[in-house]
Image (cartoon, coloured by chain):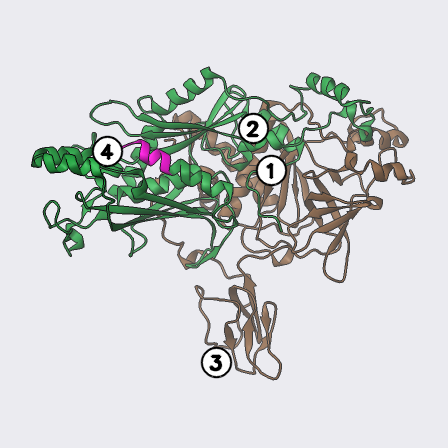
Chain colours: A brown, B green
Amino acid sequence: MPVSMLPPSAPIAAAHIDHADSDEDMSDDDSLPVQGASSIVTPGETVTSDPQWMRGHGTYVPAETTTIISTVAGHLHKTNKLLSVQPLRARYTPEIGDLVVGRIVSVQTKKWTVDIAAPMLASLPLSAINLPGGILRRRTAVDELNIRTFFSEGDLLVAEVQSLHGDNTASLHTRSLKYGKLRNGLFTSLSGAGGGILSRRGGVVRSKRQTFTLQTGAGEIDVVLGVNGYIFVSAHKKSAQDEKDVSITSLEQVVSETLYSSQNDDIEPGVAREITRVSTLVKGLAACGRRVDEDIIVRVYEGAVELEAEEKVMGGSGRAAGAKGVVEAVLGRLEMGG
Amino acid sequence: MAPPQLQHVNLSPAELSFLRSTLCQDPPIRFDHTKGPKDFRSMRAEYDVLPGANGSARIALEDGTEALVGVKAEVEKSQWRPSGDAQLRDADADANDKDAKAKGQNSWMEMSVEIPGFRDDDALPVFLASMLTESLLASGGLKDRLYINSRFHWKLYIDVGGSFLVHISMLTVQILLLSPPLSYPLALLSMTTHLALLTSRLPALKSDKDEDPLFDDDWDAAVFLYPKSKANASEDKPPVIVLAMAVGPNIIFDPCMEELAVADAVLAIACANATASSSRARIVSVRTIDPPSHLTPPGVPNSMNSATGGTVPASSAEALTQRELFANSGVWTPPRGGMKRGLISQVVKMVVEEGGVAEEVISALHAIELG
């Protein structure tokens, strides 16, 4: 059925949401006016004026009062005597060492400005990238003139947050072979999920490994989960170590040849299909309100492939279910299977 | 700050090249992997959402884009037209009724489109409003039904509230965030307008002929703007606009923003349902839309990129000839030119054929109305 139109769905029952991650209150005797799973607070709303509570994230106490006021729209959490509001949607707050995926917004004389889903654009100085021809090459005036040959507007890159300025703008660097321009794949953004430890439902969780390789039937594909909620799924990049006869000295040279290429390699249709599938599933995971990490992507991907194979055997067409529909079906099966 | 540009695509040449290569395959791999070339994005629809309007509808896409349409009818004094009135005075009652068939005027319907982030005189809302109006007027029928008598008529105001981004949290909370639409919103707005008009009602007229109009107070007695007949096949319904996009050898319906960014050509086809006179869906109007892909920057092939060991061509003419050689490799080249005739007829055929896209869309909207 090509066109699927449904009446609005009833909101998901509150029982489905697990509040296990929030430390529950130890003592039950002090009741808070705003409680319950379905309640949210809005910016400016008084949470409580009882002086026994302490203010946490997302709250504010005006001078000379004891009133705790919410500064964001979100759910109220209490940890013993600490009240904090977890926003429904939040931008990413950069932290030093985070692996982020970004998009070049503008090119300036000696730096690029990069969109990393943070409140302010990050900057990537020309001095913080690997220049082709080896790390030790000196930056020259010619490089400054040719700044657009490295990155130009719209280009995607994976980088690390090197430092934070006073106004919380991030400075990035790509001085590693792991980082640099992205190509051969699809970009997905899970915006508004915050990212990092504060990640909302449906965001990327800061974990040990932000990049991993997924084994698929058609071949290997790389997934880069930016902590900022930007995700890039691409065909597996053959690392220089794979090619045996490359000596360690010329390794730099081999990499640098394609470091700033904006040309895609030949991608087999099967691999391209799997890349699109993973990217769709990631969007579905976010729509289902799940946290996105390596483990769940691998499990949902395998489940989705299995599901499609079964449907093919049954003769039914599982098409037009949408990203969310497929992920819901797979998650349902995973939960049933244990 | 400059107003946000919907047409502006901010994708890298490598992404565009990848998207195009997947969409050009047979069968095409769409941006949403679960969808086929003829599949529409799944949507949620409801009608009668605004209590003060004669008819209203709301359709929301899964990505959060949402359209709200309200139809409001007001009684307005008709302008006195010498020729028409002379005929009326001469004619007897029967002829008078017949005459009413072609009494409608285009100015009796007013459409306004509002999209967050755009001024109401920006090109996009104006163009969308004129396309929607054009298709509604072209299908006939509607404006004639606004005729009350020789002195009065209904004036129809259709307000197409733009596309919001709605974030629905897991709990029963809705936060409205106004944001520009995430794809070309014509098809969405048209479907919502269709549903709103389909469910619009006008108060029943109690007065006779040329008297000052007097209406029934009872809203339950109100008549539908598009009358419902028992034989459901042949009733007249408002037209609906379908967006189709050509990329390489494939034709894709209801493209999302990323897909539009690599389109060769985009067609907006307004079609009405089958009536007694025609057994298949009818084309009301067809327009080409300039795809944003024409404005994308071309990719730089490795051999012309000094950062990848290539040599930068000395002149722009040399660069052009070199680019031609890379037309079908992994280098993004923005599509040039328009649509071939054969392609247009192929798209039109896919829309109007029996069980085609037009029929699917209209019946899906009808199913919503039946509940």
Q: Earlier in the sequence, mark 4 or mark 1?
A: 1
Q: Is residue A120 magenta?
A: no
* Mark 4 → mark 3, Cα distance in angstroms: 66 Å
Mark 4–mark 2 distance (CA, rounded to whole Å): 42 Å
User: What crowding class fits label 1: few (fewer than 14 Cα within 10 Å), some (14-19), or many (20 or more)?
Assistant: many
Q: Chain of mark 1?
A: B
The kind of secondary structure element at disc 2 is helix
| Label 3 to label 1: alpha-carbon separation | 56 Å
Left or right of B41 in this view: A193: right
Q: Residue at x 17, y 44 (%)?
A: B149
Q: Amino acid at mark 3?
A: Asp
Tags 1 and 2 on a common chain: no
Residue tagged 1? B9
Q: What is the spatial separation of the Cα atoms under label 3 and label 2, in whole angstroms? A: 57 Å
Q: Residues within 10 Å of mark 2 (few under 14, many from 20)?
A: many
Q: Amino acid at mark 2?
A: Arg
Same chain, labels 3 and 1:
no
Q: Which residue matches tag 4?
A: B236
The first of marks 3 and 2 along the sequence is 3
Q: Is residue B176 above or below residue B224?
A: below
Looking at this view, is B277 or A183 the one in front? Answer: B277
Q: Position of residue B84 (x, y in %)?
A: 20, 36
Q: Say if labels 4 and 2 share a chain.
A: no
Whether tag 3 and tag 2 are in contact, CB under 8 A, the answer is no
Judging by the rendered image, the residue that carries numbered circle 3 is A29
